[in-house]
Amino acid sequence: MSESVHELRVRVNQTQDGFPTEAESQKWIADFMRSTGVFCVYEQVVGYPIYRHHLQEQSNVRADVLLIPKSNVEDKIRLGAIVIEVKKSGVAIGPAISQLKDYLNSVFIVDSLCEVGIIPTYGFVFPCYGQNSATASWMSHQHMGTIQIIEHSGNVCFCSGEERLLEFFPNGGIRFYRQSRNGRKTGSR
């Protein structure tokens, strides 16, 4: 029997199955990204908000994973630095999206890079199903997305809005999709 519309909505708005703890989820994605050789991978990096909204808490942020493209692939990726908010399976993605909003408004200091400040261009929730409709549109405009493990193939896809930006294949292959035009406009649509 196929999923009801309600069951599908709940599943899409929750993180993907397979990771009982956040630590397991973070270890998997960090190890996987290191194995691709495409990014320098940093974990648990402190970030400092660039601006705060009125009455917003005065605190720093800590990104689970920060990816910086290696120079040999920088021209292909064109996504810039990427921050990943990691969650365990089966939790609502709303809080993770809120955290990404804060991360994209922060500068991260990586000690091994002589304390150079990094401002991420994109933020992704992992493990998370691709989004659609209004959520996908809003996330795309904010340069946010999801990292999904495709169940039938094992491919790992970075998606923003309803577009794939980057895809890794189990055999080590990588597909760089065209640069997204989403999120480039300012002001009214």
Image (cartoon, rainbow, N blue to C red):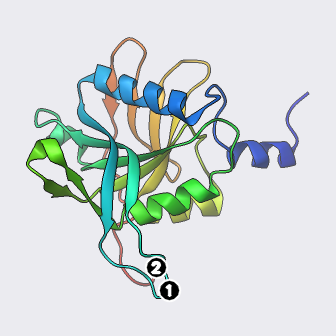
Give percent across and percent down for residue 9.
Answer: 77, 49
Give percent across and percent down for residue 130.
Answer: 58, 43
Secondary-structure class at tag 1: loop
Give percent across and percent down for residue 72.
Answer: 11, 32
Nearer-N-terminus badge (1/2):
1
Q: Which one is in front, 168 or 41?
A: 41
* Quarter of image, res 70: top left
Which residue is at a point 33% across and 15% down the rendered structure image?
Answer: 172
Residue 84 visible somewhere in the drawing: yes
Secondary-structure class at tag 2: loop
Q: How many marks?
A: 2
142 over 161 or under it: above or below? below
* Quarter of image, res 141: bottom left
Q: Which one is in front, 142 or 58?
A: 58
104 over 74 or under it: above or below? below
Q: Which residue is mark 1?
A: 55
C-alpha distance separating marks 1 and 2: 29 Å
In the displayed orientation, state which residue is furthest to the front: 58
Residue 140 visible somewhere in the drawing: no
Which residue is at a point 23% across and 24% down the rendered structure image?
Answer: 37
Hey, what amino acid is under mark 1? Leu
* Quarter of image, res 164: top left
In the displayed orientation, state which residue is furthest to the left: 114
Hey, what amino acid is under mark 2? Arg
**Mark 1 neighbour class, 10 Å CA radius: few under 14, some 14 to 19, many 20 or more:** few
Q: Which residue is mark 2?
A: 189
Question: Which quadrant: the N terminus?
Answer: top right
- Tell me, yes or no, whether the two marked residues, 1 and 2, touch with CB atoms within 8 Å: no
Which residue is at a point 40% across and 83% down the rendered structure image?
Answer: 187
**Mark 2 neighbour class, 10 Å CA radius: few under 14, some 14 to 19, many 20 or more:** few
Which residue is at a point 14% across and 41% down the rendered structure image?
Answer: 112
